[in-house]
Amino acid sequence: MKSLKWPESPNNLFFAISGKEEACLLMKGAGIMFLLDYCFYQSLTAFFLLLPAGYWFYRSEKRQLISKKRQEARWQFKEMLSLTVAGQKAGYSVENALLKSYGDLAGLYGEDSGICRMLREVKSGLDNRLPVTELLGKMGQDCSIEEIKEFAEVFAIAKESGGNMTSVMERTAETISNKAQTGREIETILSARRMEQKIMNIMPFFLIVYINLTSPGYFDGLYHSPSGTLIMTFCLFIYMGAYSMGVKTASVKI
């Protein structure tokens, strides 16, 4: 088998957020604080008091990003199975076929992808003489992806019973592929709903900014009085509740 370059995994977080992604999330959090302050308070003091709202938005966006990475890993795992089956048919053992798929997957998805992180963990375990069944089971538990857990269970049973591993892998890969394809189709359908949700989320801000720019002083009674501050705070909580409900409604577990 051709020797591959295996970068070290910094940790066991298969869906870790990169530094660039973290910076982008922080900028979004700061941006939403500025937008909320401009639309609801127009006060420097309020900007700093909105830190919890910015942090809440940051955490919400981070959860959505990790969820997206997990969905992508499901499809990547399907590709890994197909490559592994092809490797077995070419005469490789299961372990070597798994490792051989790394090069193709790194070319398709990048070395920092979830599936490549998983394969680096598998290689590390194999180098330490751990059984592949144990490594696959641990991989499924660590990443909390049902398809990987199911495959690890089927693989362990087939390995223990001495069945035709190539045939078992091929049938399992086909089943998981069909499930992954269904999940991708559902995601495509939901993407339109999520776009509608995002448009609805920004519409209140668009209207407030538009009125502020075209009719200066229109909201002064709300920005510069105690009663106005209370009203705007109440509106802010309603908006955040609606945003949270929208995110949960559009987040369907597949």
Image (spheres, rainbow, N blue to C red):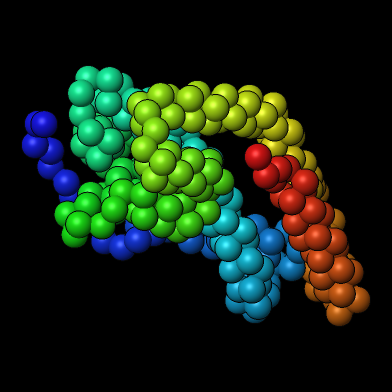
Place of residue 224 in the rendered image (x, y in percent of width and height, measured from the top left):
81, 73
**In the shown orientation, is residue 99 left or right of residue 195?**
left
Assign the C terminus to one quadrant of the image. Answer: top right
Q: From where the camera sits, is residue 18 visible?
A: no
At a point 87% along the width and 74% down the height, the residue shown is: 230
Compared to residue 98, the image places residue 32 above or below, namely below
Q: In front: 11, or 68?
A: 11
**Number of marks in picture:** 0
- Left or right: 14 in relation to 188: left
Tell me what residue is drawn at x 27 percent, y 20 percent: 89
* Residue toward you, 201 or 219: 201
Q: Residue furthest left?
A: 3
Looking at the picture, how far across and down is residue 66, in whole percent?
A: 51, 52
Residue 63 seen from this side: yes
User: Residue 129 vs residue 207: left or right?
Assistant: left
Give above or below for 209 relative to 41. above
Q: Quadrant of the N terminus?
A: top left
Relative height, residue 36 to residue 147 (above, below): below
Q: In the picture, residue 43 is in which quadrant?
A: bottom right
Quadrant housing residue 183:
top right
Relative depth, front residue between 85 and 104: 85
Residue at 77%, 60% (x, y): give it. Answer: 240
Residue 75 % position (x, y): 48, 33
- Where does the image place residue 204, in percent across and percent down from the top left? 79, 48
Identify the residue at the far front of this view: 161
Nearest the camera: 187 or 152?
A: 152
Question: What residue is shown at x 43% (from left), y 29% (from top)?
Answer: 168
